[in-house]
DNA sequence: GCCAGATCGATGACATGTCAACGAAAGCGT
DNA sequence: ACGCTTTCGTTGACATGTCATCGATCTGGC
């Protein structure tokens, strides 16, 4: 705990750059997405994950885990998206507690018309600015960090114990 | 607008990895910070930026710009931090509209005792997992993206016009 | 000096995210 | 079959972030 190892100049540059990029990229992508497609980033992510499944549907639990969201957050968000007609909830056949989130035709329409523009924005502001080597490095490094953090989901524990 | 250029396998890997890392790193760093220091990440960032100035104080406007926050957000956040005794607001000498955010002794104490642990966490979960070459690449790439996005601040425009 | 327009920061209404608690239903050991 | 424990998803209270608006002040052109 003593003599903390501060970040040296290069490490600091990387860390600050990362945080700044993160913020600016978010703002810009969210801005364009809202303007061009009327969706927020969370909306887009939900629709995107759903649309990648065979039938455009997933157990709420499964979707929350994939997105690294709490079930509570997802449940609240789905309520709003449901009101906009982008998804519906159906009862789950094999588990009476569960609910299945289903993409509506309007939801599929929304993601399909939003995707090209969004991917273009991701290219324009990030991918196309990188060399092939940087893209590979970014892929390698991020996956290493993710593995290290043990890609498991959140959802608060009710553990006793210290 | 036709024939969108989707991400190829490597690009997709980098993009997904980035987003996943982003989320997991955030969760973990926020968790440790809250547990060890009783601060949220926004709290930490505010205190950190303030503590890097000569007198631990900044114009609200200036602080908001550095953090890429809206003034509204910062104003709300400061109100809460002020109630916890971490910062105070003082009148600005050369501009009667302005206010100066000042680090209190308790605020300085908070950031100084939180920093070593936070830096250690950043090392443990990110920096120390990367090779020197990756750190340099990350620094280069993030700064390029930031420059491209034109590091300017948000604050909604009231423009007419398309 | 004076006025038009810009900037500063605060505020309230609202959208979104978090957290703890809950009822219902499964799982599991006996 | 029976309880005990876990999991599922929802809910309400609350924390946080966004957006539009406001009054006060500053700035620049005249």
Image (cartoon, coloured by chain):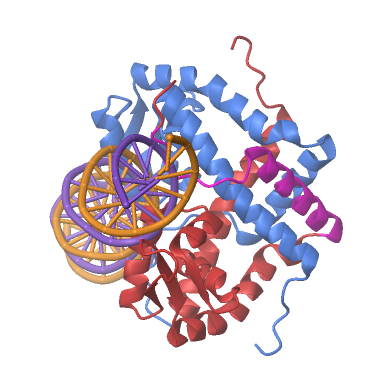
Chain colours: A blue, B red, C purple, D orange
Q: Position of residue C18 (x, y in %)?
A: 36, 60
Q: Does the magenta segment cover residue B136?
A: yes
Q: Is residue A139 left or right of residue A133?
A: left
Farthest top residue in view: B2
Q: Does the magenta segment cover residue A91?
A: no
Q: Is residue A95 visible?
A: no
- Give A36 or A74, whichever is nearer the viewer: A36
Q: Is residue C29 left or right of residue C21?
A: right
The residue depicted at 59 percent of the width and 12 percent of the height is: B1
The residue depicted at 71 percent of the width and 48 percent of the height is: B142
The residue depicted at 41 percent of the width and 16 percent of the height is: A109
Q: Quadrant of the N terminus of chain A?
A: bottom right
Kindly report the secondary structure that dominates the magenta region of the rendered protein. helix
Q: Is residue A56 left or right of residue B117?
A: left
In the picture shown, does residue A35 fall above or below B94?
A: above
Q: Position of residue A113 (x, y in %)?
A: 47, 17
Name which quarter of the figure residue B100 lies in: bottom left
Q: Is residue A19 visible?
A: yes
Q: Give, as a single range, the part of the protein colored magenta.
A: B131-158
Q: Position of residue A51 (x, y in %)?
A: 47, 25
Q: How many marks?
A: 0
In the picture shown, does residue B159 fall above or below B68?
A: above
Q: Position of residue B53 (x, y in %)?
A: 59, 73
- Give B132 or A105, whichever is nearer the viewer: B132
- Give B76 or A134, whichever is nearer the viewer: B76
Q: Quadrant of the C terminus of chain A?
A: bottom left
Farthest bottom residue in view: A2
């Amino acid at each position: 705990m003593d003599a903390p190892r501060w970040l040296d100049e290069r490490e600091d540059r990387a860390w600050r750059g990362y945080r700044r990029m993160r913020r600016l990229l978010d703002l810009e992508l969210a801005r364009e997405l809202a303007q061009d497609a009327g969706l927020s980033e969370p909306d887009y992510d939900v629709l995107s994950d759903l649309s990648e499944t065979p039938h455009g549907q997933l157990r709420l639990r499964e979707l929350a885990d994939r997105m690294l969201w709490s079930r509570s957050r997802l449940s609240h968000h789905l309520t709003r998206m449901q009101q906009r007609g982008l998804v519906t909830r159906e009862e789950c056949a094999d588990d009476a507690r569960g609910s299945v989130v289903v993409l509506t035709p309007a939801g599929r329409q929304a993601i399909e018309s939003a995707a090209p523009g969004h991917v273009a924005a991701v290219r324009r502001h990030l991918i196309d600015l990188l060399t092939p080597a940087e893209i590979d490095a970014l892929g390698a490094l991020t996956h290493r960090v993710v593995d290290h953090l043990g890609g498991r989901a959140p959802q608060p524990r009710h553990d006793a114990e210290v």
